[in-house]
Image: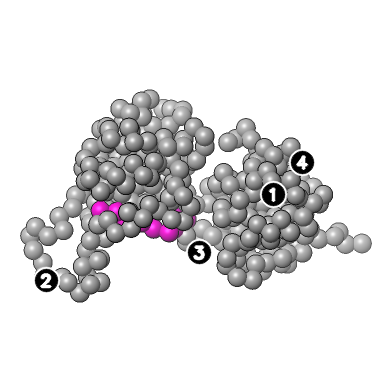
Amino acid sequence: MPQKRLSVVVTRRLPEVVETRLTELFDVTLREDDTPMTRAELVAAVASADVLVPTITDVIDAGLIGQAGPNLRLIANYGAGVDHIDVETARARGIMVSNTPGVMTDDTADMVMGLMLAVTRRMQEGLAVMQADQWQGWAPTAFLGARLGGKRLGILGMGRIGQAVARRARAFGMQIHYHNRRRLRPETEEALEATWWESLDQMVARMDVISVNCPHTPSTFHLLNARRLKLMKPSAVLVNTSRGEVIDEAALTRMLKARDLGGAGLDVYQHGIKGHPDLVNMPNVVMLPHMGSATLEGRVEMGEKVIINVKTFADGHRPPDQVVPAML
């Protein structure tokens, strides 16, 4: 007799090619529209499924996991970040968690450079003038920004994405500095021509641009707090494509309003999808709706990793991208 197909519930719409392949391999319940599941819908999903495929918009906390049915044995996250999943509680319940690491590295690093350029070259202001049909013609002193070449870039978090940012920034002629929990291997540091700072305070005070590329953990919450933000140069630019919780957004907003900071490029926010309301119309701030990994190629690759993780689990093996609490 053929093996019974796993029951898989997908919480959001995925690229069509990914949904089709999931349907071919498993007994899949797909999302009809692209809205997040309600809490009640998530409860129903974990109560019935063998495998849940959530995204960053789904809060998979201890309370939800506590309502899981006896068949739920894998949470195959569609995305690399798992801070929305209580991995320890899942493990205690015998439920494995997997993710999709490494897929969005280049896409996110590209977006870091895009935001860096957008803020330093005042693209937001230029775009606003053009959209309002207010441009009066070229002038020698209009929209003067700053070039990236020769500037010092401080990377907070030198993992895969941080290193990809470093390689791109070197091509722009920037000087690479970084702060990390652990110093890179000498050969990696040499290849990136990167300078390590053990003290984040000392690095922050010297940089022209800071790029946040570290995950959100208890130790990184408000790592860039009001005190550290005040150490930055008044002309410096802050770019965040990682997690909004790493920055004290209220303190950042106050500094930007007071022009105590040159500008900011933000793709993530401390309180979910809403950035601080005062940030919205600031000319020196570029805000994006969490687009860092938003390429079709990247989204399909994420789906392929989910499929591999679920298929490996279905075959009785440990998913290649399993996440355990010790990794967090």
The earlier-in-sequence mark between 3 and 1 is 1
In the rendered image, residue 286 lying in the magenta stretch gets the answer yes
Give percent across and percent down for residue 212: 39, 42
Instruction: Look at the numbered discs 2 and 4 and tell me whether their residues touch, using CB distance below 8 Å.
Output: no
| Front residue (pair 263, 20) | 263
Instruction: Look at the numbered discs 3 and 1 and tell me whether their residues touch, using CB distance below 8 Å.
Output: no
Main secondary structure type of the part rendered in magenta: loop
Quadrant where the C terminus sits is top right
- Which residue lies under the disc numbered 1? 64
Q: Residue furthest right?
A: 1
- Which residue lies under the disc numbered 4? 94
Q: Which mark is residue 136?
A: 2
In the rendered image, residue 56 lying in the magenta stretch gets the answer no
In the visual, does 11 lie left or right of 273?
right
Give percent across and percent down for residue 138: 10, 66
Tell me if residue 289 can be seen: yes
Magenta stretch, residue numbers: 284-293
Q: Which mark is residue 296?
A: 3
